[in-house]
Image (cartoon, rainbow, N blue to C red):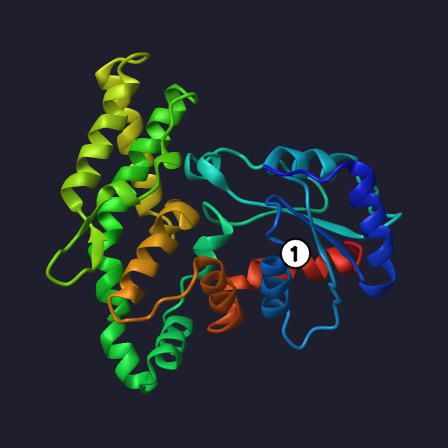
Amino acid sequence: MLKWPDRAISAIRKLFEPLQDIDVYVEDAHDEAFYRCLLNSATRNNDVKVARVFALGGRQPVIDAAKIHDQKTRRALFIIDGDISWVKGEAIPSMVGLHCHDAYCVENLLLCEKALTLLLSQDTAITEDKAADRLAYVKWIQSIELHLIELFSAFATVHYFDQTVKTVAQGVGVMCIKHRSTGTTELDPSKVRAAKDKALKSAEKVAAPDAISEVYDRMLNRIKGLHNPLHAVSGKDFLIPLLDFHLQSFGCRIKRKALRIRLASAGDPMRFEALADALNRAARGYT
C-alpha cells in the first residue's frame, strides 16, 4: 500500500490548512475523494469545511498519529475501520480525536435501500417504485445475512486463536456461483459453509474443538445481537461486491469506486450520524 512520506503529508496539509476548519486523516491511500464525499454527505447543511482528506496508509499509522497529535495546535479527526477486532468485541483505542466506525469498515455504512433504489432508477431509466420492486432489498439482505454472519463468526473465532490465518483476504468471489443461463452471479450458501468449516478446522491446529466451539458460539451471539448484524461482515470485500453482482443482474453496471461514491452521496444521511458527530466535536475542539 502506497504511503506518503511524512514530509509530503505535512506540506500538503499546510497547503490546504487555510481552506478547511479541520484536518481529517484516514487509512487507505487513493481514497481521499471518497472520504471527502462521505464527509460532505454526513454533514449536509453544516458549516464544517473539509477541502482535503489525508491518507496515512493503514489503520495503525492513523492510531499512532492520533496518539501524538496536539489538538490545541490544529484540530483534527483520525478515522479508522472497526476490522476483525471490532467484530470480536475488543476495546477500540480510546483517545481524543480518534473515531472508529461502528462496523467492520466504512463500506458497511454505505448500504442503503433508498440510495440503491435511486441509483438503479437512474441507471436503468425506470421509476423509483419499479426500481424498488426489482431491487427487493430486504429480501436480498435476508438471502445473504445468516450465511455471512456465520462465516464471519468463524473468521473472528480463528482470529481469536491465531491471527496469522488469512480469512477476509480471500474475498467473496470464490464463494459465488455464476449462472450460465442468465450470466448473473450470486452467493453460493454451500461454498460459504465450506469456507466457514475450513476456517474453524484451521483453528484446531492451535486449540481444542470444545474451546473453538465455545468461542464460535460467543462470536455468533454477539454478531446476532448487533443492531445491524451485517455490520460485522466486511463491506469492502464481501458486501459491496455482492451488491455489485445484484445490480448487474438488472443491467446496472457501475465501477465499484464510482458505486461507493454514489452510495455515499445519496440516501439516508442518518447512517453517517456517528461520523458527523465525531467531525463536529473535533471541529469544536471537544469543548
Of residues 139 and 164, the one drawn nearer to the viewer in this rendering = 164
In the rendered view, tell whether residue 110 sits above or below residue 165.
below
Query: In the shown orientation, is residue 207 left or right of residue 49?
Result: left
Query: In the shown orientation, is residue 22 left or right of residue 259?
Result: right
Q: Amino acid at mark 1?
A: Ala
Query: In the shown orientation, is residue 269 left or right of residue 280?
Result: left
**Residue in the picture at 81% in, 62% down:** 21
Q: Is residue 228 visible?
A: no
Residue extending furthest toward the bottom: 127
Q: Is residue 191 visible?
A: yes
In the rendered view, tell whether residue 282 sits above or below residue 124.
above
Q: Quadrant of the N terminus?
A: top right
Per the image, label 1 sits on a secondary structure element best described as: helix
Q: Position of residue 218 (x, y in %)?
A: 31, 33
**Is disc 1 surrounded by few (<14), some (14 to 19) or many (20+) residues within 10 Å?**
some
Q: Which residue is mark 1?
A: 278
